[in-house]
Amino acid sequence: MTRRLSAGRIAILVVLLLADALTGFEVYRYLGAHTAARLFQPQKPTDPGQQHHSGPIAELPGTLYLASEGAIYRLRHGDFGLVLPAGGWTQPAVTPDGRSLIVVKRQFAFSDLYLVSSGGQIQAQLTNDASKRYEFNDWAFYPRVTPDGGTLFFDWDRPKDLQATYNVTLKVWSMPLGNPNAPRRWTTPVAYTGGDVQPLPLSPTELIYTRYFRDQQGNVHSELWLTSRPDLTGLLPGHALTAPEDDCSQAALSPDGKRLAMICTHGGQTTSLEVASFDGTALGPPLTLVGTMQAAEPAWAPDGSGLVFLAPGNLAGDFQLFWVRVPVGPPSGATTPSGPARARPGPSPSPPPAPVQLTTNLDFDATSPIAWHA
Amino acid sequence: MVAIVLVGLVVSCLGGALAYFAPALALAYRATGRTAAVSLPHPAGRASSAATATTVGDRAFTVLLLGSDDDQKFANANGGKTIVTQSMILVRVDPVTRRAVMLSIPRDLWIQLPNGAYGKADQASEFGGPPGATAAVEQAFDIKIDAWVWVGLTGLIRLIDYMGGVDVVTSQPVMDDYYPADIDSKDPYAYERVAVLPGPQHLNGHDALQYVRSRHGDLQGDFGRSERQQQVLMALKAKARYIKPEDLPNLASTFNGELQTSMSLTQIRGLLPLAQAFDNPDQIQHLVLLPPYTTSRTIDGQDALVGNWSLILPLVHQYFGYA
């Protein structure tokens, strides 16, 4: 015997079916909203909620320039501002007067250096690396201006190795900032290592750079190299500041010129941020300021009180901005006036200061040095 | 009445969850438990490689990781695509000691292929796909492989992008003017210029692939590339700890046919806790068959690597056991 459904019962049934459908949909939506991937989405420095910061980041003096996802941002008193919109921009270097930047614009098969005002107005293209012939495109990276503001050092993959086209290496070059047509090559890299990178000019005639080479077992190492003469023949004038097994790179000189910060891997897959005294020819024993957190691109505060650097700082592993105070008077033990080795790391007099994370969900380019002007 | 309402809610909850996980279930059905027996004609050859019969317990086991494109320039005579495995990594996991060993097999290593002829190791998958490659590796190295996992290049890119990129420390500038631009290009012979700068960095899928695939600017060629592949694998593993069950449907869509394995779902489920236990890079040993384990030769007009098997086999047996 069947009972006829009353209107009331039909209404209840419809409501129940709707509730069931809604529940199923909400379960679907809930699961979709709880993926780990949602946590892997960084923000831009100028996004709402990221643009203005208080706390330690607002206490950084001067202006910092950083690259993120092809754009250049300035950071001043805790506020981020856009200097150059996304377009392949990276590796800003600031001129000593703070009025201009030299910035790399990276494109599909080449990159060029541009002179840009600190406000983001393009003033000049300093290299012309695009070519209709694919093999004649060039890469230009790592611009850095001498302390007197007159000379620009940078990396170029010119001249090409026409005998071995697979051997593509970066070489350190310089040119007068006011005359881009007079470039001068400074280094002759070891073949098939990727080349010499990250020039740090001490003056127009003195240079620290990262040199890559192979040991007798064929393993690639990096070392910081100091030279005062261009090398067009591979005779390698100058001398090493760090030992091959330390695998150091990304040198940054303190404003007073007496301390050198660097990133070292010691042959492993983690990096440490180290600081050593520098007397103009050799390094003292290094102090490890930051270990095992993949620190990159240290940059000194204008007053020499500490360093900012980049390191993974969120769930996605995006590189965030950190600050670490540098103890006054790092170890100043025996220096090695000649030869390739610096003094071995000595015991730290006291635990180094803990680094402070300044940003939380941004995505800075960890191969782009940070420019910092007072 | 109350019971009906409750049952209805439970059913709708299950329905919503089922709908959500449907792509993952479909992938699990399509991509796992892929088995095929490949017999090698060599007199000493064994009928293999089922590469299936492993359960995750306390027993050490060996997995062959295969990475490849479906490159059009390797189209076979019938016009079909041929898969060339650009990356072959043997992984031995010991659940008891919590240690693992990774051995990269050079793609140019001259071994017997499943069709009986000799050729480069990367061509083995032309004959029977991943099971064929597994059989060839088993025979060449005289080991037992318990399972294989194959990932396509575009699958790797999408996986890394879905996981928000990976962190690696690139040991030197990786410069390559003749990197194959065959992923999104209509021209399978196109190439592009690559410059991966040195130092710690966060790589997206595209850049990570360039890093692990480029070999022209590396004096160690495929060996250097093998080390980079192991490095990115470790970075991916580190990232995988954050993946939640809710990510599985999206991951399934991400792979979209770019993932296959001989392992069953049960076996994969058993492996997950073990993978979590390997959180220290020092637990994993990396091996690359550099000279004197191999020697460069030209064979039949091809650049090949001839194995010094009197050195290779003791090394492999030490870490991977015997067949």
Image: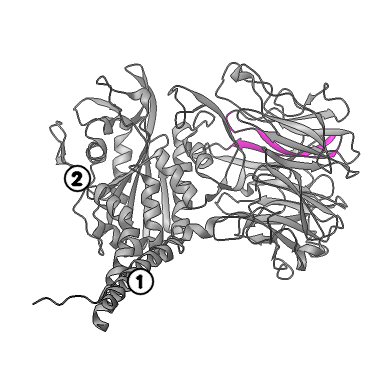
* Element assignment for label 1: helix
Q: Please say whether residue A203 is one of the residues in the magenta stretch.
A: yes
**Considering the image in quadrants, where does the N terminus of chain A appear?**
bottom left
Can you say whether A301 is above or below B7 in the image?
Answer: above
Q: Where is residue B312 in the image (x, y as percent from the top left)?
A: 32, 39
Please say if B47 is above or below B186: below
**Is residue A135 something one can see in this rendering?**
yes
Q: Name the residue under label 1.
A: A19
Q: What secondary structure is found at the residue carrying circle 2?
A: loop
| Magenta stretch: dominant secondary structure | strand
Q: Is residue A221 left or right of residue B157?
A: right
* Dot 2 alpha-carbon crowd within 10 angstroms: few under 14, some 14 to 19, many 20 or more: some
Q: How many labels does the image show?
A: 2
From the viewer's side, name the closer residue of A63 and B8: B8
Name the spot of residue B152 as percent of width and height, x first. Answer: 37, 39
Q: Mark 2 points at which residue?
A: B35
At a point 58% along the width and 25% down the height, the residue shown is: A167
* CA neighbours of label 1 inside 10 A, class few (<14), some (14 to 19), many (20+): some
**Horizontal placement of A95 versus B160: left or right?**
right
The x and y percentages for residue A355 are: 70, 65
Three-letter code, disc 2: Thr
Q: Quadrant of residue B245?
A: bottom left
Please report the bounds of the magenta region as a residue range. A192-214
